[in-house]
Image (spheres, coloured by chain):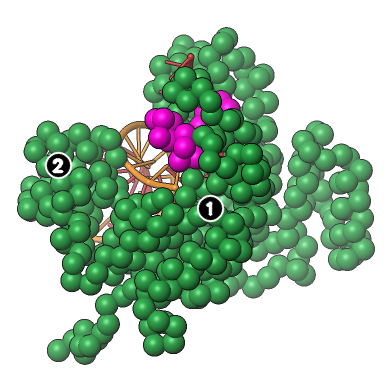
Chain colours: A green, B red, C orange
Amino acid sequence: MNVDSVDRPAKAILHADLDAFYASVEQRDNPALRGKPVIVGGGVVLASSYEARQKGVKTAMGGSEARRLCPEAIVVEPRMSVYSQASKEVFAIFEDVSPLVEGISIDEAFIDVTGLWRLVGPAPAIAQSIRRKVREEVGLPISIGVATTKFLAKVASVSAKPDGLWVVPEGGELDYLHPLPVRRLWGVGAITEEKLASRGLMTVGDIAGVSPEQLSGWVGKASAHHLSALAHNRDPRRVVVGKRRSSVGAQRSLGTRRPIGRLEADNVVLELVDRVTDRLRKGERVGRTVTIRLRFNDFSRATRSRTLPQATGATEPVLRTCRDLLEEVWPEVKERGLTLLGMSISNLDDAHAVQLSLPFARRSRDDADTAIDSIREKFGRDAISPVTLLGKRGIEMPMLPDDIPARSG
DNA sequence: TCTGGGGTCCTAGGACCC
DNA sequence: TCTGGGGTCCTAGGACCC
C-alpha cells in the first residue's frame, strides 16, 4: 500500500500573471496613459494595454497594423530596466508568501501554497492577499489562477484576466477543463490546433475522449502523451525553485531593403556574440554548443551549430565558431537573402573560473585598464595574465588559479 | 505592414562505444 | 566472422511560449 497517498492533501498551486505587464508599468508611471490604449514598442507590438486590445491590437503584431486598428493609441518605447525592477519587486512579494516560487518569465510564476493552509489560510485567500499587495506596493494589476496542478492553475489565470482571481475547486477540475477549446492546453499552438480540428477535436474534453495511441499518430508521441495527461488534469510536476537557463542567445532582424554583405554580417555577429558572452560572464556561466540562426527572405529558417571541446564564456572562441558557421552557410545566404541573424550558446554549465566581462562596444579602453588594475590589486600582479585583447571590442581573461571555486554539484 | 527578441522542448538520423 | 541491441552525443529542424 502506498502510504504516501493516504490522507495526502491536494496540492494548492497558484499561477500569478501580471496583466499586460509592460503596458501596465507605463500606465502606472504616467497618469496621462491611464484608461487609454497604450502600445509598447514601435516596430512591433511588445505589449498593449487592455484598451488597445479591445481594438484588436495583439502582441507581436506589426506596428503599422496596430496603428491602423487603433489610431488613437499612444505608442511608447520599451523601458526594459524599469520592467525588470518591477518584476523583482513582485517576485519579492511572492517569496515573502511562500518559499516555493518558480519563475516562468518576467511576468509569471507558480507559487505552491499547499503547506500554508494551517498557518496562513486557504489558497484563494492567499491569492487575494498577493493581488492586494502587488497592487498596493508595486502599483500593478495581477491575475491569479488557483488549482490543484500547475497546468490547471495556468489555465485558470487566463480565465481570471484581467485583474482577477479564478479558483478551480478540488473535484471540479474536469468540469472546468473539458468545455475549453484545445488551444487553451499548454503546448497547443496554431499548427497543432489545426491538426486536431481536422480530426474533429475541438475541446479539451474531445482530447480526453481519444486514446493516447490514437493521438500519437496525429501529433507525435511525446505531444500526445502530454496532451492526454493534461486533458485528464494529470500533472505531477512540482513547483521547482531556482531553475536556471539552459541557453543564452541574441538575434537581430535585418530588414529586406538590400542584400547584406559579408562584412556587415560579420559585424552583426560580433555584436551579438559580444552581448551574449557578456551576459554569460555576468551570470558566471559557460557554454559549449554555439548555434547560429538564420532567416531568409522567404522567412524560412535554418540553424547551424557546433559543439566545442571545452565550455567557454570567452568572446573569442565563440566569435570564431560563429564566423566559421556563417562561412559555411554563406553560399545559401547569397542565394536566398538574409532577414535575420541570431546566435545562442547552450549546453551551459557554471563557470569554475573568474571571468572578466568588459565589452568594449559599450566601454572605453580606460575602463578596461581600470578593471585590470583593480584585479591586480586584489589578486596579485600575475592574476591578470594572460589577457587577450580583441581589437577594440572585448577583453578575455582566463583564470585566477587560486580563485577557482569547487564544483558544486 | 511584410512579421521582434528572448527562450523551452521534442524528433530524428548518424556517429560512436560497449 | 557475423550480428545485435542499448546508450549517449551531436546536428538540424520544428512547434510553441511570453
Secondary structure beneath dot 2 equals: loop
- Disc 2 residue type (three-letter): Met
- Can you say whether A9 is above or below A375 in the image? below
- Disc 1 residue type (three-letter): Ile
Q: Would residue A267 appear left or right of A147 to someone viewing this image?
A: right
Q: Residue at x 23, y 39 (%)?
A: A192
Q: Position of residue A166 (x, y in %)?
A: 33, 61
Q: Which corner quadrant of the image does residue A31 belong to? A: top right
Q: Would residue A112 appear left or right of A41 to someone viewing this image?
A: left
- Looking at the image, which is closer to me, A155 or A383? A155
- Give the chain letter at badge 2: A
Q: Position of residue A180 (x, y in %)?
A: 20, 49
Q: Which corner quadrant of the image does residue A151 belong to? A: bottom left
The residue labelled by disc 1 is A106
- Can you say whether A293 is above or below A145 in the image? above
Q: What residue span does the magenta drawing correspond to?
A: A42-59
Q: Which mark is residue A202?
A: 2
Mark 1, other Cα within 10 Å: few <14 / some 14–19 / many ≥20: some
Secondary structure beneath dot 1 equals: loop
Q: Position of residue A252 (x, y in %)?
A: 57, 29
**Magenta span: helix, strand or loop, mainly?**
loop
Q: Residue at x 30, y 50 (%)?
A: A186
Q: Is residue A213 visible?
A: no
Mark 2, other Cα within 10 Å: few <14 / some 14–19 / many ≥20: some
